[in-house]
Image: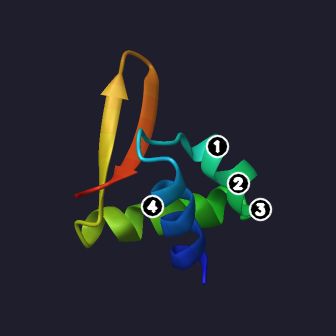
Amino acid sequence: MSLDKVTKALKENPKGLSVTQIVELTGLSKSETSKTIAEMQSKGLIEKIVKGCRVTYKLKP
C-alpha cells in the first residue's frame, strides 16, 4: 500500500520529490516513507538525486 502511494506521488511529480514532500502528499509517516524509499531503491525503481544539501527521488524511466 505504501509502495503504491509513493509510486503515485512520484509519477505525478516527474522532476522528483523530497522525503518531506512525499510525506505531505501521501499522508505516510516519515519512517514509513523512508522504509518504502529504501525498498524501492533496492529494487531499482527510483533514483536518488543530490544537489547540494537537497535530496530528491524520482522514478527511473
Q: Which mark is residue 50?
A: none
Residue 37 drawn at (x, y percent): 45, 61
Kindly check if marks 3 and 1 are in contact, taking CB atoms under 8 A apart as contact.
Answer: no
Residue shown at 60% from the left, 84% from the top: 1
Residue 5 drawn at (x, y percent): 60, 71
Q: CA distance from mark 4 to mark 2?
A: 14 Å
Q: Which mark is residue 21?
A: 1
Residue type, label 2: Leu
- Assess disc 4: are there few (<14), some (14-19) or many (≥20) residues with their C-alpha within 10 Å of its C-alpha: many
Residue type, label 4: Ile
Residue type, label 1: Gln
The answer to whether 39 appears left or right of 10 in the picture is left
Q: CA distance from mark 4 to mark 3?
A: 15 Å
- Assess disc 3: are there few (<14), some (14-19) or many (≥20) residues with their C-alpha within 10 Å of its C-alpha: few
Q: CA distance from mark 3 to mark 1?
A: 10 Å
Residue type, label 3: Gly
Q: Secondary structure at mark 2?
A: helix
Q: Nearer the viewer, mark 4 or mark 3?
A: 3
Question: What residue sits right under mark 4 in the picture?
Answer: 37
Q: Which tag, 3 or 1, sits closer to the chain's start?
A: 1
Q: Nearer the viewer, mark 4 or mark 1?
A: 1
Residue shown at 74% from the left, 49% from the top: 24
